[in-house]
Image (tube, rainbow, N blue to C red):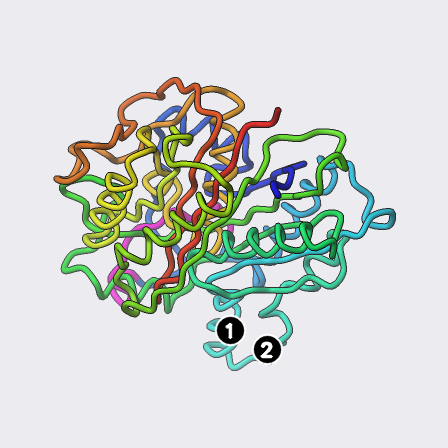
Amino acid sequence: MPVEIAASAVRTCFGDGDATFAALLGGRCGVAPLSGYDPAAVHVRHGYPIPDGSGGELWPAAGWLRDCVRRALADAALDPARHRVAALVGTGLRELRAVERAVADRAPFRAGGLHFRSAVADAGVPGAVTVANACSAGGHVLALAQDMIELGEADAVVVAATDAMTESMLAMIGRVADEPADRVRPFDRDRAGVLLGEGAAALVVTRAGLAPRVLARVVATGLSCDAYHETAPSAEGVRRAMDDAYARGAREPADASLVVAHGTGTALNDPTEAAALVALGGPTTVTGLKGAIGHTSGTAALHGLDVAVRCLRAGVVPPIAGLRTPLPGAEGLDLVRDRPARTRATLAQVNAFGFGGVNAVTLVEAAR
């Protein structure tokens, strides 16, 4: 049973959702030199940071999350005191940056801060559950939210995600390339690797007829956990998540004419994802966000969903920032580049793939 999206609020290196979508349509790139880290130590020189973000505040991810949840609740015009409202938070790294600082400063650390229950409660919804599930975490909590509403366990669910850059994650991505990337170039022949972004997102999804305004409907989220490799994607596992989404939603791939891709700009992800999309045979127009806002870890799925909803409502798709020459094997895809593309899509597919083969593929359709 589809659930309705009553509101969506995001934060990226460009700002809120309106500012981010405008930047995407303009083909802008939010990459910037790293600050607050030693580039020589982590072998990374650039990222997509939120200005005055993880380099300053002790608990940055919680702060961005709190702001997004407050905005989404206000926009949804739902009172948690009058309805059964639950909250789920997806994350890849939790508040790891705060742990790193505490260790470096030999300072006390509040372990409960690794979870986001307090931040969401401050925004108006008590009892949030945090799900740490790599880079598809946002898609996984969205799937859980839909289950909760279908089973009658909640009238509405705040579906949120947040992640900040961390020194350890920067050091990890710095080890997988001979030379640090200067920017992310999804699906490009000369892509050099991924760079981190950061931010948060919060959606309010409800049962049908509850919200006074409906932005779009979540048809289904397909999941897979293939455990193929610690970091390398599996084409079979990715395809299984796609097939699961269409089966759960009683849709066919031909019904979706827009894909917001995972598109990390890495040697392995992009050809694997491109091959899976070509084999799927339905979606044609493909965009991606990471060339503009970086890889926002566990928040990536919900950032992609927010953009997909905006594309469906506005009838326009932003180009893939950083894409110059498409990689071999992507010939069957209409990769949006150089300028925005018009679309009449009414159903969009949003991909999110995580380390260990935890994959989430969401289908979202325009409000009727």
Is residue 268 within the magenta segment? no
- Badges 2 and 1: C-beta atoms under 8 Å apart? yes
Q: Classify residue 283 as left or right of residue 274.
A: right
- Amino acid identity at mark 2: Phe
Is residue 49 within the magenta segment? yes
Q: Which residues are magenta?
A: 39-53
Which is nearer the N-term, disc 2 or disc 1? 1
What residue lies at 70% left-to-right and 43% top-to-bottom?
Answer: 206
Look at mark 2 in the image and give the residue it sits on: 109
- Amino acid identity at mark 1: Val
x%, y% of residue 24? 40, 30
Q: Quadrant of the N terminus?
A: top right
x%, y% of residue 23? 43, 29
Instruction: Evaluate whether residue 55 shows in this view.
Output: no
Look at mark 1 in the image and give the residue it sits on: 99
Quadrant of res 177: bottom left
What residue lies at 47% left-to-right and 64% top-to-bottom?
Answer: 133
Q: Which mark is residue 354?
A: none
Instruction: Evaluate whether residue 44 shows in this view.
Output: yes
Outermost right residue: 82
x%, y% of residue 126? 76, 60
Neighbours of disc 2 within 10 Å: few (<14), some (14-19), many (20+): some
